Amino acid sequence: MRKILTTALVVFSLASCSTVKTGTSKTMDIVGAGVIHKPVIADLTVSQRKVSKTVTFTKMETLEAAKNNVVRELLKEHNADVLVEPTFESTTTAGKTELTVYGWTATYKNFRQMEESDIKFLEVRPSFIQKAEASQSVLSTFKK
């Protein structure tokens, strides 16, 4: 009897186990309360070719989390740092959501201290400085 109970307990505990894989992406703006440093400028090399990535989700927490996952996968595929002007299309059918992102991949090059000539650019369009964003989402859940 004891063997049966022990075996049932082990089988039940293994059947209910699941593995959750998560990914984190963080961005931090260098302008903000309590942050003081010498500004750094970087050149952005943007690909001339528009790329896309489509992922099908059967279960997703939110549409925003799904968008983050698709962009992350696209950037990883193309070894890029940022996606310029991303646009999204989604289709949901029978509980499955197919999400496609389009955009231009880009990489940062030539990090350097800000020079006087860079100040003129900031005077023309200071709105180019963007706010910090951080997001974390569940990539996939596997049942064992």
Image (cartoon, rainbow, N blue to C red):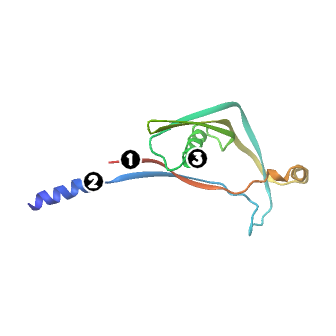
**Sequence-wise first label, 3 or 2:** 2
* Count of numbered circles on the image: 3
What kind of element bears circle 1?
strand
According to the picture, the residue beneath numbered tag 2 turns out to be: 14
What kind of element bears circle 3?
helix
The circle on residue 108 is none
C-alpha distance separating marks 3 and 1: 19 Å
Which of the 4 image quarters holds residue 27?
bottom right
Q: Amino acid at mark 1?
A: Phe
Q: Amino acid at mark 2?
A: Leu
Closer-to-camera residue (126/28): 126
Residue 130, compared with residue 45, is above or below; it is below
Q: Position of residue 83 (x, y in %)?
A: 67, 41
| Residue neighbourhood size for the residue with mark 2, other residues' Cα within 10 Å, grouped as few (<14), some (14–19), many (≥20) | few
Q: Position of residue 9 (x, y in %)?
A: 20, 58
According to the picture, the residue beneath numbered tag 1 turns out to be: 142
Q: Position of residue 118 (x, y in %)?
A: 87, 51
Closer-to-camera residue (106/127): 127
Furthest toward the front, the residue is 94
Furthest toward the top, the residue is 49
Who's the residue at 54% across and 45% down the image? Answer: 66
Q: Amino acid at mark 3?
A: Asn
Who's the residue at 55% across and 54% down the image? Answer: 136
The circle on residue 68 is 3
Disc 3 to disc 1: CB gap under 8 Å = no
